[in-house]
Image: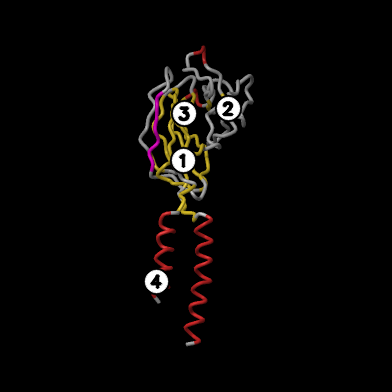
Amino acid sequence: MRYLHKQLSLCAVVVGSSVVISGGVQAQTITDLFNTGVDAGKVKVLPGNTTTTDLHYTSAANVFVEQSPNGSWAGSADSNYIANDGGDGSSVNGGVYSLAYSTTFTLPLNTNLSSVSIAGQWSTDNSGSNILINGTPTGLTSPGFNSFTNFVLPIGSYQTGTNTLTFNWANAGGPGGLNVRFTTMTYTTVATATPEPGVTALLAGLGVSLAGIARRRRRR
């Protein structure tokens, strides 16, 4: 019996000192989150004509990549403005409307949800009233189109699988549009404990030893 206790103690010491933590230390990039007005390769789309639709944002109607009116909108090398017509966003209802534009992205099942970090900038003509994460409002706003406003999305509303970001914005007349660009899109995975190969072998050997001890005890 003392031999059995010794073996178990040795096993506990080795296992306790040989666990390798893996899978939770390196940040991963959210690859399926896109700026407004880009193609599948995340390259900025030039409007060119009135039929260029955005591939990644949706609303109650078609979402078009917009033409900047007289270059007055804040510029970006990796995103473009989008709105509800193929011109400058002014042809529907004289440019007076409130819209919600949504985009989706995915997080794997082993995501550490408290590690999700999404930040960026947005610009709106005329104003942005909120950003929602899976329907939960963040209270973040955008005051206008002359420059970009930074945003950092809070944690607490993300989920594994599909996530939806919704940008609420409004136009007060004339040209209108929404421009969103992401600067940070990362997460880490949940760490898992993996025994080293030597520990696995030790556990297998211990099992054989215990079986032998049990047989000897039965013969007595």
Q: Which residue is mark 2?
A: 38
**Mark 4: secondary structure:** helix
Q: Along the polypeptide, which appears first: circle 4 or circle 3? A: 4
Q: Along the polypeptide, which appears first: circle 2 or circle 4? A: 4
Q: Which residue is mark 4?
A: 5
Marks 4 and 3 close (CB-CB < 8 Å) = no
**Mark 3: secondary structure:** strand
Marks 3 and 1 close (CB-CB < 8 Å) = no
Identify the residue at image location x=43%, y=20%. Answer: 145
Residue 216, magenta (yes or no): no
The residue type indicated by label 3 comes to Thr
Badge number at residue 213: none
Q: Is residue 99 left or right of residue 61?
A: left
Q: Which residue is mark 3?
A: 183
Query: Which residue is at the front of the view, 101 or 120?
Result: 120
Q: Position of residue 160 (x, y in %)?
A: 48, 48
Residue 150, magenta (yes or no): yes
Magenta stretch: give its range. Answer: 149-155
- Real-space Cα separation, disc 3 to disc 2, in angstroms: 15 Å
**Mark 1: secondary structure:** strand
- Real-space Cα separation, disc 3 to disc 1, in angstroms: 14 Å
